[in-house]
Amino acid sequence: MDNLKIDLPEAVKFIIGRLEEAGFEGFAVGGCVRDSALGKIPADWDITTSARPEKVKELFDKTIDTGIEHGTVTVMIKGQGYEVTTYRIDGEYEDGRHPKQVEFSDSLRLDLERRDFTINAMAYSDKTGLIDYYDGLGDLGRCLIKCVGKPEERFDEDALRMMRAVRFSAQLGFDIDEATYSAVCKLAPNIEKISMERVEVELMKTIMADEPAKAVLYHDSGLFADILPEADRALNKKYREHTVYMLENIRKDKVLRLAALFSMTDYRDAEACLKHLRMDNKTKDQVGGILRYSKQLIEEREPAVREAIFKQGTEQMAYIFDFLEVECKAREAVTGIPISARKRHLALLKNMFDRIIENGDPTSLKDLKVSGNDLMKYGFKGREIGQMLEKLMYAVMDNPKINDKDTLLGMLDILK
Ligand code: ATP
Ligand code: MG
């Protein structure tokens, strides 16, 4: 079972080789071993070593002190960075968040023991082959997320691991081992100790995964009950079917997946939740905008669609159409009642939208053939300028053919 062969990248072989020549141990470890064993291409390669950080720095030409106090040095090879971390024993965790002190060790076994899940606790080098003390390979085969050691102790040390369990289950499509999941349910309230920034990272990784519906575990386990009540509600029994349909059927885009998560939530509550998560303002506004605008009706006329683009922007309108299309299907799926009239209406609007974009119709002030400067030359001042530009904008959205400088200047007197 343990004779798995991993094709290490040249740079990783080089780093491990140099560590070994100098009398140390070195292994690829964690996510890269897990992904390789699954036949996936790892996003990055982490290395674990018996060498202390100062030694690692001596052995390689170009290094960056990434987290030297935690034993991590980034080794640069041909412009790419590889994190090389000294074997660690994580001391007791202060407040379930940070290890109080990090202790270096000479033992790979202890380093693997501190890692969260069996599938993340495997190491590999060409010299030794796979090192798998906790049957990570077996759990990969069984499609299980299972703690290394006693789940309750591990979640007590670091509450974030509970969210990581859900996240990996969404990314890999795995179940969470029974004892591990029971411990999540029991210790869920401890998630409160974790900073919202870290919660956000795990939540985003979960809903951007191939099985975003695993996010329901955040509700079922109680992880979100206190920290994110709005998201918790979106995943409860009453709204779950709709929310899950949305998550599973909307394309993999950060804004759209968040809008899907909150598709049964009032936009103000969704925005409050995103603010609480410390989400950047742009994303928060985009998601809130989709939820709010999707409730409004647009007339089936090109000028009305151009006006909607003018108000929302092209990117946001495209989001809204993507969202509405899936939302319509979600409603059909949940109620079992076809809603063909709304579908036709949306298809028609989307068609107009595509045509407007294709034709390059005026939909923003910069498309207008008259500028604020032009208006100043005609004696407009201060707020009048913006007001007149807007009037001209509405005129050209009504009829794009009149978007011509002379025509528009000729209209100034009438519009004033
Ligand atoms: P990915 O980078 O694809 O999200 P990963 O498994 O590489 O997944 P990282 O967060 O990059 O995850 O962590 C690298 C490794 O460090 C993990 O595989 C695991 O062995 C260990 N690890 C990370 N975070 C924790 C934690 N909170 N508790 C215990 N071990 C952890
Ligand atoms: Mg990683």
Image (cartoon, rainbow, N blue to C red):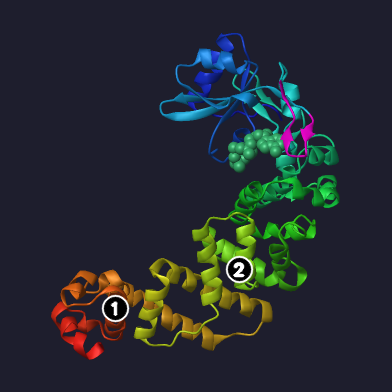
What label sits on residue 220 in the rendered view?
none
Q: Which residues are magenta?
A: 92-103
Residue 346 sits above or below residue 272 on the image: below
User: Is 410 positioned to the left or the right of 251 in the image?
Assistant: left
Q: Quadrant of residue 39?
A: top right
Q: Position of residue 6 (x, y in %)?
A: 58, 29
- Is 114 one of the magenta-colored residues? no
Amino acid type, label 1: Glu
What label sits on residue 246 in the rendered view?
2
Q: Position of residue 133 (x, y in %)?
A: 76, 27
Residue 363 sits above or below residue 217 on the image: below
348 or 190, nearer to the observer: 190
The residue at 18%/77% (across/down) is 379
The residue at 70%/28% (across/down) is 2
Q: Quadrant of residue 397?
A: bottom left
For the question of whether residue 34 can be seen, the reply is no
Element type where label 1 sits in the image? helix
Quadrant field for ligand 1:
top right
For the question of whether residue 125 can be seen, the reply is yes
Q: How would you rate the neighbour count of disc 2 (Cα within 10 Å): few for under 14, some for 14-19, many for 20 or more?
A: many
Between marks 1 and 2 in the image, the one whose residue lies nearer the viewer: 1
- Is 100 one of the magenta-colored residues? yes
Residue 282 sits above or below residue 343 on the image: above
Q: Earlier in the sequence, mark 1 or mark 2?
A: 2
Instruction: Measure the C-alpha gap from mark 1 to mark 2.
Output: 45 Å
Element type where label 2 sits in the image? helix
Name the quarter where the C terminus is drawn. bottom left
Residue lying furthest left? 406
Label 1, on which residue? 384
